[in-house]
């Protein structure tokens, strides 16, 4: 009875490959992680070896508020994606803008901190080993936030002109991978600079 | 996938003016054209780097020679090393990967064609920057021109105090820029391999080259990035007054060594894994057997990739690490011999019982097997810390890594050029000239690098611009230099063959070697669109299936 069903030639399984954008972003994140690892290793290796002041213990203040801003931007971009997938244009644009705003606020916080360190404590990148490692590690991260903000803003502008719909979801997702990465790196940088390094 | 469908060569023939042709090549995003650009660019730097090696060997041919000044000698070995690693071997393997990977996996192009072009031009401008230092390196300081800090540029030699002028900056920025190009290409290759395979081309059916390029690209991501980070730190030190590698301010010169070799050792595998890939494609075809132990080859490649990231400090045994670190790095270094040995046995297993055809590509691969074995044996010697304390920084080390880079990598690259030249140009390289090239190069190679071990054991340090007579080094150095000239002559013969065969060579047809991978199913050179119909495959040897419908591989898959 079952003979007929057995001899049926199986249709070739559907050929499914991962989306190239996601693969590429994952690769970029691996490469970037390696770069950050080297800077983090340098920071930890030199922590406490500074020969002259100011030292991290004297001048660093933990940027709790701005850290909360950056980390919550990972949530808002997630909600923005959620709305985009369902075609909720207003929700998408709103949360997308909130993400940019929170990221911008974080960058502003870094600017305030640097201004204070430079003008109140006289700490620049060439002052001592702490200045060199601190500004390059935090600066490398801030550079990535800046790049992320530029990309987010471009998507926002396209969104305003109505060119970002649910058909662009995969691309938006790739950008959001990058933004999550930038936030995750901050967790590491924060731990290293403001907790372990002091 | 039928071959007559492939024979279409549409509007490929450009009949425009030379300006249009040039414009076409400069603005191209076609993976095949970019591959050719990579290869030509690498061959140019192969000639330049080779000439620098000849200058080094003329200077060392006898004691107290004064062919070049010590300053020029330092520039020559720095430029020779930097050129050969970053602007010859890397571009040439990227070139082959670019050209072949999409064809082998049945794709129309790379995943990101414009990123591909961008990466190539970054690498190209990196090379130009490096060589512009001969003109611009003096800057306002009147200090030395081309970089003279050695290819690993140890701190504090690169600090402003010891490298005034801009020569070290040109070195740093050239390597940094070409490194970004390499990362771009690696991302592109991984995305292509994972996301662009034709239907049926599962990872387990990919040609071994696909796997090996995948591992190589992964290593690029993980190891070129630390180099980029270290170069950024060096730039911060040189331009912004930072103290990363400034021992006066508490910085550490040893940290640069670690960062450099965290890049430097995986780099060896970035270069040699594509060489393995070429051998793994060529040896089966000329043994008329499928590759022996495909899954084991894949596993060995992946494990080489992982282990290679934990061996870097075997370049640094002499800086004085504690015995736990020494032991760790000795053991990891020894461990890498296991997967490498597995590969050698698999290639031998492929040849065993096969109908061997000693065409030029095969000759180069057989020489590769012997020479890579010897290189691995001296590598094990150097991987033992006590032995290394005696020989580190001597000509023994120079002989060892040239055995790897020339004896293994360059030989496989030559094999690859002989093997795929018909696909790229449509004409077969002249076989008799090829054999003369092979034998001359083998003789030159062994005359150079076999005797070179001995002055190293006798205590001759690397990077010295001259030496005292009567130390037992004179005769050996003379032989080494003669061997270098022979290699130079062989290379000229090879270049002549490339040019002559391009115009006069025998027409290749689609498949001159009766091979089994997809690139041989299309015309030579392939049309811009690669495949008129995207093929679908059912085994590791799709062309075998096509040629032998009575006994296809897919039956055993």
Image: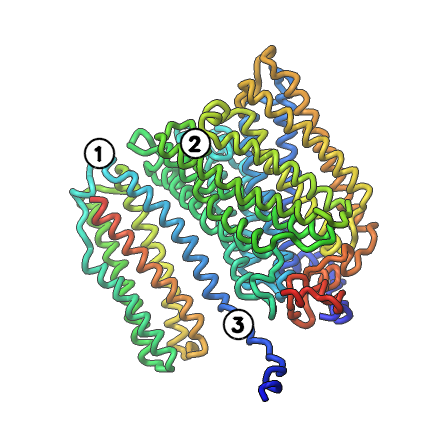
Q: Residue at x 46, y 42 (%)?
A: B263
Q: The residue tagged with tag 2: helix, strand or loop?
A: loop
User: Where residue B116 sits: x, y (%)?
Assistant: 56, 58
To which residue does mark 1 refer?
Answer: A52
Q: Residue B316 has which mark? A: 2
Q: Is residue B69 above or below residue B122?
A: above
Q: Secondary structure at mark 3?
A: loop
Helix or strand or loop: what does disc 1 sit on? loop
Host chain of mark 2: B
The quarter of the picture where residue A108 lies is bottom left
Dot 3 corresponds to which residue? A16
| Residue B76 appears in the figure | no
Verify CB contact (< 8 Å) between mark 1 and mark 2: no
Look at the image and tell me in which quarter the N terminus of chain B lies.
bottom right
Of A113 and B344, nearer the camera is B344
Specify which label sits upstream in the sequence, 1 or 3.
3
From the viewer's perspective, tell me whether residue B511 is left or right of residue B342. Answer: right
Residue name at image x 69 percent, y 43 percent:
B365
């Amino acid at each position: 009875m079952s003979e007929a069903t057995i001899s049926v030639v199986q249709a070739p399984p559907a050929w499914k490959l991962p989306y190239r954008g996601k693969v590429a972003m994952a690769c970029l994140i691996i490469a970037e992680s390696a770069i950050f690892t080297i800077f983090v290793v340098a920071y930890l290796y030199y922590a406490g070896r500074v020969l002259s002041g100011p030292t991290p213990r004297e001048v660093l203040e933990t940027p709790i508020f701005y850290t909360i801003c950056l980390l919550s931007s990972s949530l808002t971009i997630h909600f923005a994606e959620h709305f985009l997938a369902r075609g909720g244009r207003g929700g998408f644009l709103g949360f997308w803008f909130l993400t940019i705003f929170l990221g911008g606020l974080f960058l502003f916080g870094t600017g305030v901190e640097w201004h204070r360190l430079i003008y109140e404590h006289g700490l620049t990148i060439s002052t001592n080993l702490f200045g060199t490692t601190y500004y390059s590690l935090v600066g490398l991260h801030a550079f990535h936030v800046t790049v992320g903000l530029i990309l987010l803003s471009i998507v926002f502008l396209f969104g305003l002109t109505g060119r970002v719909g649910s058909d662009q979801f995969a691309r938006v997702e790739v950008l959001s991978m990058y933004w999550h990465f930038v936030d995750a790196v901050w967790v590491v940088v924060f731990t290293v600079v403001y907790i372990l390094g002091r | 996938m039928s071959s007559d469908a492939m024979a279409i060569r549409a509007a490929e023939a450009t009949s425009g003016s030379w300006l249009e042709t040039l414009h076409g090549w400069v603005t191209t995003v076609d993976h095949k054209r970019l591959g050719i650009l990579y290869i030509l660019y690498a061959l140019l730097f192969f000639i330049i780097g080779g000439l620098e090696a000849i200058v080094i060997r003329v200077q060392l041919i006898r004691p107290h020679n004064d062919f070049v000044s010590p300053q020029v000698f330092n520039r020559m070995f720095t430029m020779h090393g930097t050129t050969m690693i970053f602007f010859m071997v890397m571009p040439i393997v990227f070139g082959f990967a670019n050209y072949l990977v999409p064809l082998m996996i049945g794709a129309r192009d790379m995943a990101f064609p414009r990123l591909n072009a961008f990466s190539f031009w970054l690498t190209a401008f990196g090379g130009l920057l490096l060589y512009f230092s001969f003109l611009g390196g003096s800057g306002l300081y009147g200090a030395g021109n081309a970089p003279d800090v050695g290819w690993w540029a140890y701190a504090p030699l690169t600090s402003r105090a010891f490298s005034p002028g801009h020569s070290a900056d040109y070195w740093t920025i050239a390597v940094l820029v070409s490194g970004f190009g390499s990362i771009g290409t690696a991302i592109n290759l991984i995305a292509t391999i994972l996301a662009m395979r034709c239907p049926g081309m599962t990872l387990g059916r990919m040609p071994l080259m696909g796997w090996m390029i995948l591992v190589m690209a992964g290593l690029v991501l993980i190891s070129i990035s630390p180099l980029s980070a270290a170069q950024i730190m060096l730039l911060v030190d040189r331009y912004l007054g930072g103290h990363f590698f400034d021992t006066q301010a508490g910085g550490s010169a040893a940290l640069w060594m670690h960062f450099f070799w965290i890049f430097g050792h995986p780099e060896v595998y970035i270069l040699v894994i594509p060489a393995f890939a070429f051998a793994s494609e060529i040896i089966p075809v000329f043994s008329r057997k499928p590759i022996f132990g495909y899954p084991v080859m894949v596993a060995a490649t992946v494990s080489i990739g992982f282990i290679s990231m934990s061996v870097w400090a075997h370049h640094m045994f002499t800086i004085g690490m504690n015995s736990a670190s020494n032991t760790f790095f000795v053991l990891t270094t020894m461990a890498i011999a296991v997967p490498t040995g597995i590969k050698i046995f698999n290639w031998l297993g492929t040849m065993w019982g096969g109908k061997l055809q000693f065409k030029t590509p095969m000759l180069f691969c057989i020489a590769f097997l012997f020479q890579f074995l010897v290189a691995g044996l001296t590598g094990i010697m150097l991987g033992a810390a006590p032995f290394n304390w005696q020989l580190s920084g001597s000509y023994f080390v120079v002989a060892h890594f040239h055995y790897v880079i020339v004896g293994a990598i360059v030989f496989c690259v030559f094999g690859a050029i002989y093997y795929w030249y018909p696909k790229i140009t449509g004409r077969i390289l002249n076989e008799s000239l090829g054999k003369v090239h092979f034998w001359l190069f083998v003789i030159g190679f062994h005359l150079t690098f076999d005797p070179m071990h001995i002055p190293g054991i006798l205590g001759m340090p690397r990077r010295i611009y001259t030496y005292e007579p009567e130390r037992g080094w004179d005769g050996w150095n003379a032989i080494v230099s003669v061997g270098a000239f022979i290699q130079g002559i062989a290379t000229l013969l090879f270049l002549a063959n490339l040019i002559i065969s391009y115009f006069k060579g025998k027409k290749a047809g689609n498949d001159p070697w009766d091979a089994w991978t997809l690139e041989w199913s299309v015309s030579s050179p392939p049309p811009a669109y690669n495949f008129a119909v995207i093929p679908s495959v059912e085994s590791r040897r799709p062309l075998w299936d096509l040629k032998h419908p009575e006994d296809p591989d897919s039956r055993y898959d």
